[in-house]
Amino acid sequence: MEVELIAIFFSLLSLYVSVRVAWDTRFKPASLSVVMPHFVFWQFSSYKGQSPTGEVVSRKHTPALCIRNFGAKPEIIEDIRITFKNNGNEVISYPVSVVSIDIIEAPSKNRGNRELGEGAPFLGISLAANEEWKNTYAYSMKVADYEILVGDVEVYVEVRTRNKKKWKSIYSDTYSFGTHPHHLRPLKQEGVMTIGSSNAHVYLKRWRETHG
């Protein structure tokens, strides 16, 4: 009797392992995980000839954004956007131009730009199991919309997946912009040479609280 029970136990265990492996490798639905430790926020001046006027005509942001699919089935992301919420205000940004990964990872080396990347629509991405995608887009919204990005701001990454009409949030966290964010400072100051563009990092609130 004891031998039969042991045999039954190992049979059930083998069945469980087989089912679990099949689930994890073939049937587990797509599961998206997002990492976004910081943004770089940019602003650009208009020009008169070769000289910047100091008038801000464009603002953009490049998130250090990585999306990974931990499911077994693939996921197709047809559209993506970033939503900012602060004190009852909400603004939404969309990818507007393609940039090199260097722009995102080493922005200080690209301060001479008059704009970011080439205009191009978001073409969508397909993520197989354990595949990841790193953002190579600059995002933007109306110049005035950036005015609400002061202090602690809730940020959401939202996507529309294949055959879905509604947006779905796949990530949210709070970012610390500070009381006088760099992306709202003028490009032209009295007694200081006018510059054509500026950029600055904005980090997660918890990172800022830890590192100061």
Image (cartoon, rainbow, N blue to C red):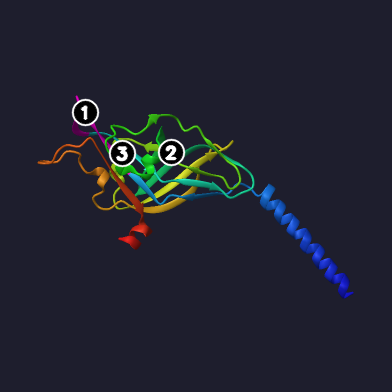
Q: Is residue 44 magenta?
A: yes
Q: Secondary structure at mark 2?
A: loop
Horizontal side, residue 170 vs residue 210: left or right: right
Q: Is residue 31 magenta?
A: no
Q: CA distance from mark 3 to mark 1?
A: 18 Å
Q: Secondary structure at mark 3?
A: helix
Residue at left offset 45%, top offset 41%: 135
Tell me which label, 3 or 1, sits earlier in the chain. 1
Image coordinates for residue 12, horizontal then vertical, percent:
79, 63
Disc 2 designates what residue? 136
Instruction: Say which of 159 and 98 sits in front.
Output: 98
Give the answer, above or below, for where 7 lies relative to 62: below
| Residue type at the position of mark 2 | Thr
Tell me which label, 3 or 2, sits earlier in the chain. 3
Instruction: Say which of 142 and 54 sits in front.
Output: 54
Q: Label 1 crowding class (10 Å Cα cut-off): few <14, some 14-19, many 20+?
A: some
Q: Secondary structure at mark 1?
A: strand
Disc 1 designates what residue? 47
Start and end of the magenta stretch?
A: 41-55
| Residue type at the position of mark 3 | Asn
- Check contact, mark 3 vs mark 1: CB within 8 A: no
Tell me which label, 1 or 2, sits earlier in the chain. 1
Q: In the rendered structure, find residue 110 and report the number of the disc placed on it.
A: 3
Residue at left offset 75%, top offset 60%: 16
Horizontal side, residue 147 vs residue 27: left or right: left
| Residue type at the position of mark 1 | Tyr
